[in-house]
Amino acid sequence: MSCSKYHLNPANSTSQRLRFLLVVDEETVVSTTDYLDFIRQLRRRLGVRASHSIPALAVQADPPPGFCDIIVEVDGEEYSGSVRFRLRVDNLYLIGYQMSGGQWLEFDRPPNTAPLIQGSQQLGFNCSYVSLAGALPVGQKMTSVIIGLNVLGSTIRTLATSEVGGERARCLIIAIFMFCEATRFSPILDLILNNPEGRVIQRWMIDFVRSWGILSGALLRADAYPDEPFMLANEDVIHLPEHNLEIRTLADIVSILGILLGLCFTGSRTSLSLTALNNAQPQCFVGLPLLEVFSVEIGGISGDDPRIFGTITISNGVSTRKVYNRTKNNSEYVGLYIEPNGTPEAIIAYGEISIDVNLLLTYDRELKRGLDNDETEAMGGSIEFFNDTKTTVAWDSDVFISLDPAKILVDETITWDAFNLRSPYDQVITAPLASAALGSLAINYAVCRNAVAATVFVALREAYEDTSEVYGRIHAFYDGWPQARSILFHRKSGDYASVERGHNIPLLKSVVPVPLIRNSLKIEANLTEYDPIADDPIVYQTFDFPIPDSLPASSFQDSKKNDGNQIRITVNWSSGY
């Protein structure tokens, strides 16, 4: 499929003409001499349905339901030629382009996967903005790239002829913003139209374009479930400084979107259970795509009582949430892994998700100051030293490892992209953190494609004492997927939680995504009451909470009584919004 013939004379440009073609199913379907009209017709032609009077793309599928080609021709004094861009019609993702000599180039794909464009060569980077920015020439970044009608001619010339990876990446960013993002977002289109000479990409634009999936989902979900309220939380309000706008309601979303991502939702939950609906319409959402971080594995770090602290932050284009957050004063001993202790909300994963891991290392004992690296090395490495500007850590007599002044253990971003339909769902993903300064680290997470949110509360319902010192472990997992364990509570006997009778036990986290391909959420509790003389068992039991037939819902179960001790586990079920 390809996009339509189009004519444009950019402002203040007399040396070249730009001509655009939109071809769908090998047929030219649009012809215009105005950029604004071209984008509007692109929206109309690719929309197969509508929500709130905004066209929506075909439902995402693997393999894609079809492709569209945008051909841009340049006719000028110094250069005449064209480039053909191929896009998916279900998400407007650019997958590759054809140079003037006929060679197709495609964004990198996972190993052992077939190309979407037959005969194509891989570009050496993928289509995410993180990868594109990483491929830019030295010293350049996303906010160095200029987009505008008057830079489009040189962009086409470079893509048609250049074999330099950095220049290709820069020009592909321009093309994606001018065709894909301008079609998706009215504010991006306005900026391009109002600045024909060009503007550098703004920081707010980079954040803004990542919100497309969630904002599209909000409108389409409102059609399916009109009684379900929607409003962005105060901390998630989208600010558009160029337009002096705040986006927080459905009406606000309608005002900025030009076309919607190809999502669909089942419209009724009354005749079938949630799991039955999911099985009946596997391409559509009954719940939501939800992400969960399980742990960070740690290996190869030893020394004099090393402790770890820092943050793990997840951003989905709208929400930014810390799922792990410890200060230096609240650091924890380095073990085999660390467990999330953060957000009380579900994290929606419609689009590109970034997981920023920033962890630091410190030590129990007060360390000496004032020695430089040479003095430290001369001492043979038997002591660890920190000073105000440099940290040197000695693990044994002949191994020294220098860390930067902030004592950073790892500072790395992991990206998961829903628009890449080869991104794995419903399985544990173990992503190595290659930038770790010491040892080896890897983060374990999963994205459940169609899930509901279970909010868990664990109360000490009955106890022999008015206040009990509780330690042990509570974790949640799914039937048939035992390796994906959400740690809700984990304390050793020397770090017990003081809990009054009838009150909730403080959990590390309380919200667990539950995929609808499973039947239930299981919660295993192994708790003990600390006593200086002899500890008393509270509970050692596994509870099974079936996924309810409809939402919202709530259920609870009491444990077996054990020497006067009893807990109650309550699960509140919701969509995750």
Image (cartoon, rainbow, N blue to C red):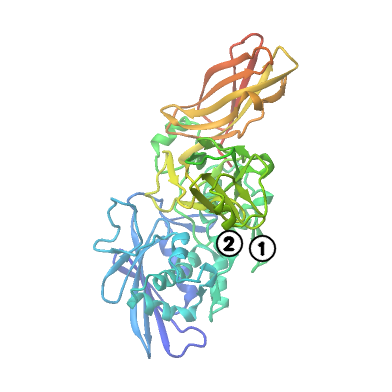
Is 191 displayed left or right of 180 in the figure? right
Q: Which residue type carries mark 2?
A: Ile
Q: Quadrant of residue 540?
A: top right
Packing grade of label 2 (10 A; few <14, some 14-19, many >=20) is some
Marks 1 & 2, CB-CB < 8 Å contact: yes
Point out residue 224 in the picture as x, y percentages from the top left corner. 52, 44
- Note whether residue 361 is visible: yes
Tell me the SS state at disc 2: helix
Q: Is residue 265 above or below residue 177?
A: above
Quarter occupied by the N terminus: bottom left
Comparing labels 1 and 2, the label whose residue is closer to the camera: 1
Q: Which residue type carries mark 1?
A: Leu
Q: Quadrant of residue 492?
A: top right
Q: Residue furthest right?
A: 466
Please state which of residues 457 and 133 is positioned toward the viewer in this rendering: 133
Q: CA distance from mark 1 to mark 2?
A: 10 Å
Q: Please report whichever mark, 1 or 2, sits nearer to the chain's N-terminal start.
A: 1
Is 146 displayed left or right of 572 in the figure? left
Point out residue 171 in the picture as x, y percentages from the top left corner. 43, 72
Q: Is residue 163 above or below residue 261?
A: below
Point out residue 530 in the picture as x, y percentages from the top left corner. 66, 18
Tell me the SS state at disc 1: strand
Residue identifier under label 2: 256
Q: Quadrant of residue 22?
A: bottom left
Q: Is residue 187 above or below residue 368?
A: below
- Note whether residue 341 is visible: no
Residue identifier under label 1: 245
Point out residue 123 in the picture as x, y percentages from the top left corner. 34, 65
Please state which of residues 528 and 31 is positioned toward the viewer in this rendering: 528
